Amino acid sequence: MISIIYLLFGIILGQDDNIMNDVIDDRQDRKDLMQEWELMMQDFIPDDMIAFELKQGNIEILEEGIHHPTTIRGAYFISMTTKEKINFIIKDPKGNIINSKAGKKEAVFSVNITEPGDYQFMFDNERGSSDQIVTFALDIHNATYEHIKHHDLDPLMKQIQHLQNGVNDIMFETKFSQQRRESGYEQMQTTHQRLFYFTILETIIIVSVSVWQVYYIKSIIDNRRLI
């Protein structure tokens, strides 16, 4: 009886530790992400932003044709409520891996493109145990075009374009941050709910062990009196 109770108690403690470790890992990943965002994603305005379902055990491939040397930047994330993580790979037209993120719920990237052609963005959920909704944003920056365009504009048009870019940037960051906050809030609710149930179960087990110990000691005392 005692061994079974302590075994259950140990399992619950181990599950609590796993939950806390997951929370700590997610916080560290988010901290690393924000540092990368500050370094690589200033003035990030995506050309495309989509959400799609990534089936369990599948790889989803998105292709983008790039016809001139440029820099591509992007970000993706899945729901914060899941323990699952996915792999992300970018391949050049020759099939070489030029960027990758292993086991991440969310990530950002910035890659310099020197060779024109079709580039693949691969989302890997082959080892996952459930389907995932992936939100993906991509910006393809044409440095030469932007330079010429900016040079030819008069001061008023430059100001208007600057304001427009600022508004677009704020709109995207607001939308992206809102989606991440909603996912984070759902994760927090799920974690708190699980911890609440585990706490109740732990309390029941502790009370049960205490009651059993009282009756056990009482029975020993009664047996000694009989002797």
Image (cartoon, grey):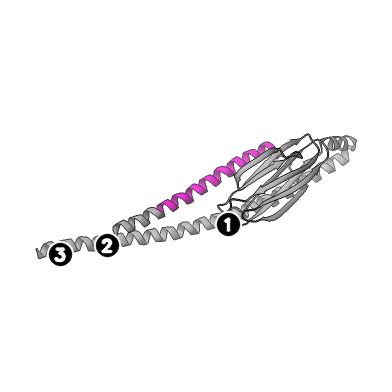
- Amino acid on which disc 3 is placed: Asp
Q: Is residue 31 above or below residue 57?
A: above
> For residue 78, which numbered disc appears in the image?
none
Residue 99: where, in percent of width, then height? Answer: 68, 39
Q: Residue furthest left?
A: 227
- Amino acid on which disc 1 is placed: Glu
Q: Kindly identify which residue carries mark 3.
A: 222
Q: Determine whether label 3 and label 2 are within 8 Å by CB.
A: no
The answer to whether any part of residue 8 appears in the image is yes
Q: Quadrant of the C terminus?
A: bottom left
Q: Is residue 116 above or below residue 86?
A: above
Provide the secondary structure element on which disc 3 rests: helix
Q: Kindly identify which residue carries mark 2.
A: 212
- Amino acid on which disc 2 is placed: Trp
- Label 1 crowd (10 A; few <14 / some 14-19 / many >=20): some
- The magenta stretch is 12-41
In this picture, residue 192 sits left or right of residue 179: left
Residue 111: where, in percent of width, then height? Answer: 72, 37
Q: Kindly identify which residue carries mark 1.
A: 186
Mark-to-mark CA distance, 3 and 1: 54 Å
Residue 177: where, in percent of width, then height? Answer: 66, 50
